Image: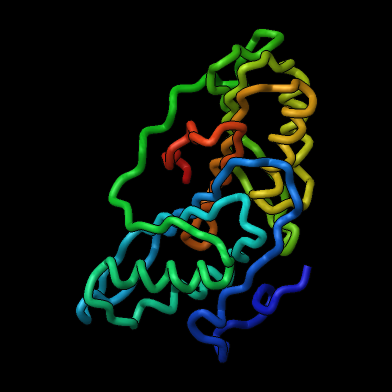
Amino acid sequence: MKTKLLGKNTSKLELKGIKLLEKIKRNKSDIKYGTDIWNVYDFLYLNNDLPSLKVLEIKIPSTSLFTIESKSMKLYLNGFYNQSFKSDKTVIQQIKKDLEGLLNAKIKLRIIKKFNQEPSSINLNNYKNDKTKINRIIKFNGFRSICPVTSQPDFANIYIYCDTPINTVWLINYLISFQNKGHFHEQCIDDIFLEISNKYNCNHLEICGRFQRRGGIDINPIRGTNTKILFLNFREFNQ
């Protein structure tokens, strides 16, 4: 995959502001509901000319035709360190306008001061039953995939809620099978959702991937069968 930023020296980059942002077309999917939660841990800008370090939460709907290439997002947001705004609200409005203009989709963006609590779950890695319990959150620890651009590994924990029992051995082996696959975070969660949905014909299924951060940003896709999303924006210890 070719991009205008990855693999290039950006120290003398002439592009500035919104021109740094690069969109990536999503793969077509029949998944109706979902969101990608981006947590930006190192967002620095000037509030009335004084440095203000915040944590941003950006929610991009999974139904958008495009998403943002992560390095371009980092470079774009890093450019705010010497820009002065009157308040948090005004800087949020500027970022929202830029991202929505590029993606042609409505996004949600806010500054957060704390994360939600990690949901109670059953650890799939130590689970002894042949099938998962229905209507309970199952957690798989140690998910690994490969970035298709940099060939570097990405790590995550996967959370699954399903109203149908899933064969435990099959599920573990399937999640492990991603270890050397070159997929973006979003595509991994799309694939997991579709594979389980097609195999078990679930009425209520929701998949959440909590990926570890890179460059001060983590991306956490959620895909589900219902309009109301079960998983809030929580943070794990190693994120």
* Image label count: 0
Q: Identify the residue at image location x=27%, y=78%.
A: 85
Name the outermost residue toward the top: 129
**Splitting the image into 4 quarters, where does residue 158 fall?**
top right
Please report the residue visible at 75 percent of the width from the left and 18 percent of the height from the top.
169
Q: Is residue 28 left or right of residue 88?
A: right
The one of 115 and 205 positioned closer to us in this rendering: 205
Its colouring scheme is rainbow
Of the 4 image quadrants, the one containing the N terminus is: bottom right
Q: Quadrant of residue 49?
A: bottom left
Residue 172: x, y in percent? 72, 25
Residue 6: x, y in percent?
67, 73
Q: Residue 111's image quarter?
A: bottom left
Regarding residue 141, the answer to whether it shows in the image is no
Give whichever of 123, 80 is nearer the camera: 80
Above or below, 79 relative to 155 = below
Towards the viewer: 92 or 139? 92
Vertical side of 11 occupied by 207: above or below: above
Q: Residue at x 74, y 33 (%)?
A: 176
176 versus 88 height, above or below:
above
Q: Residue at x 32, y 74 (%)?
A: 45
Q: Is residue 184 above or below residue 95?
A: above
Q: Position of residue 146 (x, y in %)?
A: 72, 51
Is residue 60 in sight in this rendering? yes
- State left or right for residue 59 relative to residue 199: left
